[in-house]
Structure formats: structure tokens, C-alpha cells
Amino acid sequence: MLLVREIKENFGRYVLGLRKRGVLDPDEQLRHIIDLDDQRKEVQGILDDVLSRSNQLSRKIGVLMQSGHKGEAQKIKLETAEIKERGKALSEQLQDIEKALKEKLYELPNIPNKKVVAGQSEEDNELLFQKGDFPQLEIDHQPHWELIKDYGLVDFNIGNKITGAGFPFYKAQGARLVRGLVNYFLDKGIAADYQEVQPPILVNEVSGKATGQLPDKEGQMYHLSDTNLYLIPTAEVPLTNIYRDVLLVEADFPIKMIGYTPCFRREAGSWGADVRGLNRLHQFDKVEVVQIAKPENSYAVLEEMKLHVEDLIASLELPYRMLRLCGKDLGFTAAITYDFEVYSGGQKKWLEVSSVSNFENYQANRLKLRYKTNGGKKQLAHTLNGSALAVPRILASILENNQTSKGIKMPAVLQPYLGFDFIEK
RNA sequence: AGAGGAGUGGCAGAGUGGUCGAAUGCACCGGUCUUGAAAACCGGCGUACCGAGAGGUACCGGGGGUUCGAAUCCCUCCUCCUCUGCCA
């Protein structure tokens, strides 16, 4: 959530930033927020005075009662009735204003970093580099949704029967591949000094709001109405929320967490022709890295995270590229996001396998995540996260890119994790 | 899941209707003393909002209520502990 103080101080920059995202009438919206905040201050000032008067009288009554002057106390009691009423009206008014202000602030996305271009759609994401060679596949190569059937690795039909579309069963070497990838990703993270965390995959409403999934992505999360809990769409939610309402000190940094969780997404509205096989699922496995950083370090941390993700993908011998998302495609809470995509030769498509973002203080503000400098100054921390990595699309591209007429070759780095180096028919 | 108990400052812990934002101890910070340290002594030590400041307001697990006045009474939710039940 944006800070009113920062909106005031950087009005012009914020207007431009929101415009980059295609927000309509950003100056009007920001002015409305400032206006609400001014109202808030004014009403609160008046209310504080009323309450102050009321407290004074109450204290007086207390003194009179104790010294036995009951009659005088009664007189003052009558006086308080009117004050009480005023106070009640004012506090209701204040609550309304605060609620309106909060709602407005929740509606506004983060301000993009200056490197982010505006753009109209995902077509305008900037391609920053591309590495690795495209696979030389044999003439009768197939997309992974055929390969998984032929090799018996993933079964969508059973998933349909037991749960529904988008909930596949991984079987035999397919299941081992999932498990191997998860373990490999975790071990690489641990080697890079991330602390492994295994969080709950259900979170409460407060947590969803704090990292910004709610109310923005309300319809994208599975919701358990009997307990009002949400299935996490990413480990970002529980991991980042560890630091909700926390005041850190300098010595706590760096804070680097890694966690594997299944992720659940309803993907409402995005179910189309483009999502065959493992490309888009309602449940998938992902290893996520999260860092909490001091503001002055957060962009260095972002670079470190990008390198970590790049190293992972490169080690799997997959052709990949990195893009910087344009304003239009940028997630609600992010200030800047780099997407990593791998080339999947069977379907001849680029698949997004990681998204690495700096949220600056936008999440931290909702989280009330602050830190105290050695000088005693308190300020909001920065939050960052990235996928490292999402399993199904990596799995798909490994299968597609390494297929031969005799079987599918596994990347060398995975062999210790799999116990096999080749998938035969 | 049922019955009972409990949630107070960084920690421990007092306070059960009236100058309580909260005793006391520990921890922490500054000072005196000391060659230095410890001990002792003196002082300071929660957060947020408003205000130039003086100061004001709110906060004793969350929310609501009773009252002139609530940490204290009532309702409700959450969490923890004990016992019973169930379960991997």
C-alpha cells in the first residue's frame, strides 16, 4: 500500500508511475487520497479535543465522588451527556473517513521503478537477453502433453476423476522428477545461504491482505468458507507474513528464506486454448525465495536473486531469456519484475518459469514491517521474492527439449536427485 | 470436539471500576566512581496519530458493549495451558 506522506512528497512522480500502469485519472485518485487524509486529520483533531474534555470531566467526577461531593458530581455528569454524543458522532465520522481512505489506498498499485516502460500489453515487455542453444530435435518430436502420456509420467485423466481439471497426478518417473526438482532447487538455495522454511499452505485473511493478494486477487485464490482460510497461490504469502508486525534491527539482515510449497490458483478467466498440459495448472509445485532488505540494499539483493535464478535455469541446460515487465503487465504490488522464460522445443514456445520482483516498501507498509537503524531511526523495510523455480513448466521443457526417439535424457545436475538419467518407453 | 484456566511494556510480573500508559525486578542506554571492567549509586528507557512547541488522543490478545469513567465488569472471536475425547 502506498504511503500518503510519500504521495504528497512525490506527487508528480506518482502520477507518472500510475499512468505507466494504465491507471485512469491517477492525479484525481491521488488527490482524493490526500483530501481524505486531510479530512482524517481535521476530524481526528476535533475528536481528540472532545475526548480530552471528556477525560477532564471524568477525572473531576472521580475526585468529587471520592471526597463525598455527590451532588456536584451529578451536575457534571449531566454535562458529559452532550460531549459523549458529539464524541460518538465524530468517531463514527472518523471511522468512515479512515475506511474510505484505506479502501482507496488498497485500490492503487505500487509505483513502478523508473526503469519500467509503460507498454500496452505483455507484448511490450522488454527482452533483456537470451542465452543457450535451441534443441535440435528429431523430426517426429512431440509436445510434453503427448510425451507424458507415452511415457506414463503425468495422468490428467485420473486428476479429472479425483479432483478436476488442472489437478494432475504425477506417476512413476514423473513423480520422481517432481520430487528431484524440488530437492535440487532447495539444495541450491541452501547453498546460497537461504534458510529453508516449510510453511502452512493455508493462510488467514489478514495474511492475504498483508502481501497484497487480497483484495486485488480475491477471485484467484481458493477459499475455505467454513474457516475463512485461503489456499496459498505462492509461498510468498506465508513466508513474507512471518515478518508482519515486526520491527527488525540492523543485525537481523540479511533475511533470506526459501520454501517449497504446492501452489493453488483458480486461474479464473484465463483458461483457454493456450494452456495445454502442464503449462497452466490449478495446483503446482514451486520453490520460492524471499528476502527482506534494507531500502538501500534492495536493488543489490534483486540482482543477487536474478543471478541465483539464472544459474538454476542454466544448470538445467535449458535455453532461456530474461524480460523486464512493462508497466501494464507488472503485478499489483511490484515496483519492478524480471521474468525468466525457458524455451520449450516441443511446443516451440517460451514458458515463464520465474518472476523475480522488488516490492520496495509497498508490501512492508501493509505488513507493518519496519527496521530500526543503528541510529535509532525506524523505517519500512523492502521485500523481494522470486520463483526458484516453478516445477511443471521446467518439467515440460526438460521433457520436450531432451526427447529422442529412444527416450528422454535427464540434465546431468539432476541425476543424483533422480536415480536415473534416462526415461525409456 | 467438550470442560476448566489464562493472555498486561524486550522479558518476568503487580494491578480486579477513578489522576493507570500502567508498580517492581531483569535486560538495555547515558552518567558518577575505577588504570580498565564488574559491583554500587544517579538518570533515562513502549508504539501510533495530531501539534512549531507545550501538550493532546488512542492502544493492557482482536472486535463490540455497560459506565461520567474500563487493563479491571459483560458479550464475542483468536491464541496458549490443563483434563477428557478423537486422530496421523
Image: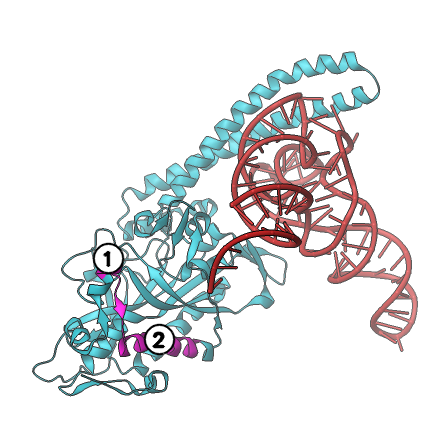
The reply to whether label 1 and label 2 mark residues of one chain is yes
Which residue is identified by label 2?
A: A179
Left or right of A359: which side holds A155? left
Q: Position of residue B56 (x, y in %)?
A: 66, 32
Q: Can residue A137 be found in the magenta stretch? A: no
Main SS category, magenta section: helix
Colour seen for chain A: cyan
In space, the residues marked 1 and 2 are separated at their CA atoms by 22 Å
Q: Which mark is residue A331?
A: none
Residue drawn at point x = 53 percent, y = 25 percent: A90
Colour seen for chain B: red
Q: Position of residue A86 (x, y in %)?
A: 56, 20
Report whether residue A362 is seen.
no
Q: How many numbered marks does the figure carry?
A: 2
Residue count near mark 2 (Cα–Cα under 10 Å), binned few <14, some 14–19, many ≥20: some
Report whether residue A259 is seen.
yes
Q: Secondary structure at mark 1?
A: loop
Point out the image quarter for the C terminus of chain A. Answer: bottom left
Tell me which amino acid carries mark 2. Arg
Residue that protrudes farthest toward the left in the picture: A139
Chain ID of residue with mark 2: A
Chain ID of residue with mark 1: A
- Cβ atoms under marks 1 and 2 closer than 8 Å: no
Residue in the foreground of this view, choosing between A185 and A92: A185
Q: Position of residue A225 (x, y in %)?
A: 38, 45
Left or right of A172: which side holds A60? right
Which residue is identified by label 1?
A: A164
The part of the chain drawn in magenta is A160-189
Residue drawn at point x = 33 percent, y = 39 percent: A28
Residue in the foreground of this view, choosing between A398 and A303: A398
